[in-house]
Amino acid sequence: MKFGGTSVGDGSRMRNASDLVTKYVREGHEAVAVVSAMAGVTDALVDAVERAGRGDSGYIEGFVRGLGDRHSQALSAVEKAELRREALRSIEGTLESLGKVLYGISCLREVTPRSRDLVLSTGEQLSAPILLACLAQSGVRSRWFTGGEAGIVTDDRFGDARPLMDATARLVKERLEPLLTVGVVPVVTGYIARTEGGIVTTLGRGGSDYTASILGAALDADEVWIWTDVDGVMTTDPRVDPGARVIPTISYAEATEMAYFGAKVLHPRTLEPAMEKSIPVRIRNSFNPEASGTLIVRHDGSGVDGSVKAVTMIESVALVTVGGTKMLGVPGVAAEVFGVLGRSGINVLMISQASSEANISFIVPRGEVDRASKALKEEFANRNHVSEVEAEEDVCVVAVVGAGMRSSPGVAARVFRAVASQGVNVRMIAQGSSELNISFVVKDDAGRTAVRAIHREFDLGG
């Protein structure tokens, strides 16, 4: 069971998370609790490490004290004084280490990926002792671990580390299974892992989901539950279309596409470990535990019914076009373009190329568009076949997702007819051979209109 930041956002929510774990343990289940940082804490740590990197040390003492006050206040949900004191000792030790690291960064005026991960790993280490104390107060035996202590081993891609699953599975079984067999609930910090050399790494923002899936696969869990603040995976963002509804069942592939294309419920890589073991994943609302949520499985069993399952949108992206009439028939241009981007560490979200080969268009995160344009212009400055590199920053990506599209003729026609009926101009289109999604680019101010039009066209609101 993974509990997101809003599900452990204060003392009462910690108690609620503890009650959910306790309920299932008392029913005879073995459970592992994966805990996120309290809501807003990781964002505050990001700001803190950036300020420290600029040499601003004056705020550090007050910042650390403020974190301590917030977590101490959350401990008021624990009635037993000894449990509070024990949790507070752990929290104070973590805060002392955080202060030292931030002061060190401020003196050096340098933030490395490794030091950033060390700072950002603090949030989960502050919340875990509080959940532990709540469980102890409920009479549940538990013990808390960082993700690395639990056995999650990764490569050294700081900020976006990938698990080494063979080593991880072995270590997690060695360290957690003996506890489970005697009725102890391991409380594991989400998001955090470590390299084979013991250096702290993080799994990317939202990585607590990923932690739960990694642990579930390593322990051959019956299910992985993601406790969050919504009732499940929805047909679209309800802030865009209030008619959005919960999808009862969805496939791994569909859920992965939705996570990649902007759905906030899951970390994009969450499902990989669970999918390899065919472990079902449930998305549930910790504030409405009676709701059945969304079940994610290998095949959702829906056949061709409702060929489109959901519509998502990615904002804060940019469209880059590399073009030139002399590109026609020149081999290797695409390889050169994406080679430049790869060497520059720029993530490409979507690609489209006309059969004329006169241009290649692709989507990158908006924050990386200047670097992408500069790198490409420098690469092709002295070559004749590329004459222009253009970027548009006022765009967004709309993705239409559904496994049933592959067996339902005319879906694309309905999608673009619905969009056109609202006067929305499509700038770029991409569809994979799997036919699992249709993605297209429109101007920022037309994105929500396009999403609502498609949501209505396929009656996704029911």
Image: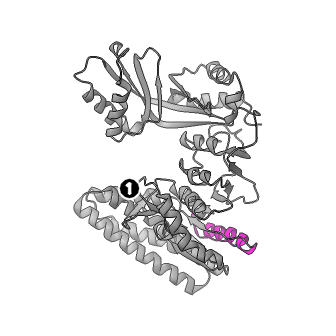
Quadrant hosting residue 291: bottom right
**Label 1, on which residue?**
158
Q: Indicate yes or no whether the magenta region holds residue 232.
A: no
Residue 131 appearing in the image: no
Q: Indicate yes or no whether the magenta region holds residue 19.
A: yes
- Seen in the picture, residue 401 relative to 12 is either above or below; the reply is above
Residue 274 appearing in the image: yes
Q: Position of residue 80 (x, y in %)?
A: 61, 84
- Seen in the picture, residue 391 relative to 341 is either above or below; the reply is above
Q: Quadrant of the N terminus?
A: bottom right
Nearest the viewer among 429 and 223 is: 223
Residue extending farthest bottom? 82
Q: Mark 1 is on which residue type?
A: Phe
- Seen in the picture, residue 77 relative to 327 is either above or below; the reply is below
- Residue 263 horizontal side relative to residue 115, left or right: right
Q: Position of residue 149 (x, y in %)?
A: 47, 71
Range of magenta residues:
9-27
Identify the residue shown where x is 56% and y is 77%.
143
Nearest the viewer among 193 and 294 is: 193
Q: Position of residue 13 (x, y in %)?
A: 62, 66
- Residue 116 horizontal side relative to residue 136, left or right: left
Q: Quadrant of the C terminus?
A: top right
- Residue 222 horizontal side relative to residue 50, left or right: right
Secondary-structure class at tag 1 = loop
- Seen in the picture, residue 167 relative to 413 is either above or below; the reply is below
Identify the residue shown where x is 71% and y is 28%.
407
Q: Main secondary structure of the magenta part?
A: helix
The colour scheme used here is: one colour
